[in-house]
Amino acid sequence: MNQTVNTSIKKADVSVALAAYKGEQYILEQLESIARQTVLPREVVVTDDSPNDLTGDVVTRFAASAPFEVRYEKNVERLGYRGNFFKAISLCRGEVVAFCDQDDVWTEDKLAVMVPLFDDPKVMVAMHNVEVVNQTLAPLPAANAKHWAYEGRYEAMQPDPWYLLFGMCALVRRVVFTALKVTDRPTDHTWPTETMSHDEWAWAMGTALGRLVAVPQKLALYRQHETNTVGAPASRNRRENLLRTLAAGQAQYLLMAKCSAQRAAVFEGVTAPELRDNARRAADYYRRLSASLTRRAAVYSAAAPRWQRLASVGTMALTLGYRSKRQAGLGGKAFLKDMYVCLFTANETAKS
């Protein structure tokens, strides 16, 4: 699949991808906020998974006087959250795709701030902070502010590859979805019965193929209500984080090893000359990480005696499995956790 990356971007060569489902209550407010942008997008693409025409009626009325092209497509069969977003993205024609949730509201300068970041042809993903609000747009306590902790520029493979990107705050160069086979999407590492969501794909693939730019401005109101498909991340204290970390066992590490191998396979299929070098480095990274995670799973085998699990930790250390995460290792914290599990927990607590 040969692709050529356009090294320049027109100021407003942006498609907004909006995957709708029963969005008639809030979608007009979102569309109007896009129409108020000081830099308008090229188009808004709406794919509708709703069982009725209520959302479509709102979009059609808005499109009649919108200051940009609005392309609406009603799905014949329900695609679900993941499939609906990937369909919307596949219909986009802009150089850059801005993900859009139907129930949020953009600040008027969102595109004015974010679009120029893509003047750098190596930027594949750009993200911003958000203001978390309730259904009436009143601010909620910023207990989840650390989720948007990225700020600045990051080279390929510098960001955490397993970070959970919330798509409403992201713009992505469209080549991230055309130069790789989205039909071969790896497993979602947080939802093993599903394949990657659009935002998980954008983060894992985009931050491997090029640069990430993260800005601190809050450029969208992220609305929380009882029908959110995915809500703002919960806040956890250190003790809760430790317990959550210790709960991850053999099954989790085998899943991560599987996901890593699948990601390596996707990157191996990239043929675009401009992306090939980064793709090869990413493929090598994930192959090595998959091997480390497979070995680590043995440390958490509920059937293995303590001495054998300690021996697995020793083997991991000797084979550099605990080298830095930047080098496809598991990092020093993983070593401390593994030692703790081996020394201070019984076999039963090492189960997944």
Image: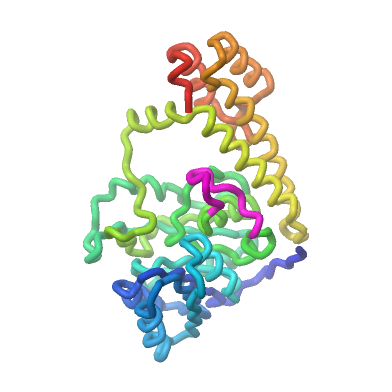
Q: Is residue 20 above or below residue 36?
A: above
With 58 as the anchor, is 331 left or right in this view? Answer: right
Position of the N terminus, as image quadrant, is: bottom right
Residue at 52 percent across and 34 percent down: it is 252
Residue at 58 percent across and 44 percent down: it is 158
Residue 77: x %, y % from top left: 50, 70
Q: Is residue 106 visible?
A: no
Residue 165: x %, y % from top left: 47, 52
Q: Nearer the viewer, residue 297 or 4?
A: 297
Say how many tags the image has: 0
- Residue pushed farthest bottom? 64
Q: Which residues are magenta?
A: 183-196
Q: Nearer the viewer, residue 286 or 350?
A: 350
Q: Is residue 260 above or below residue 217?
A: above
Residue 26: x %, y % from top left: 31, 72
Q: Is residue 271 visible?
A: yes
Q: Is residue 226 above or below residue 328?
A: below
The answer to whether residue 185 is magenta is yes
The answer to whether residue 95 is magenta is no
With 50 as the anchor, is 297 left or right in this view? Answer: right
Residue 8: x %, y % from top left: 65, 71
Residue at 24 percent across and 60 percent down: it is 134
Residue 21: image quadrant is: bottom left
Q: Is residue 178 above or below residue 11?
A: above
Residue 138: image quadrant is: bottom left
With 348 as the anchor, is 234 left or right in this view? Answer: left
Q: How is the image coloured?
A: rainbow
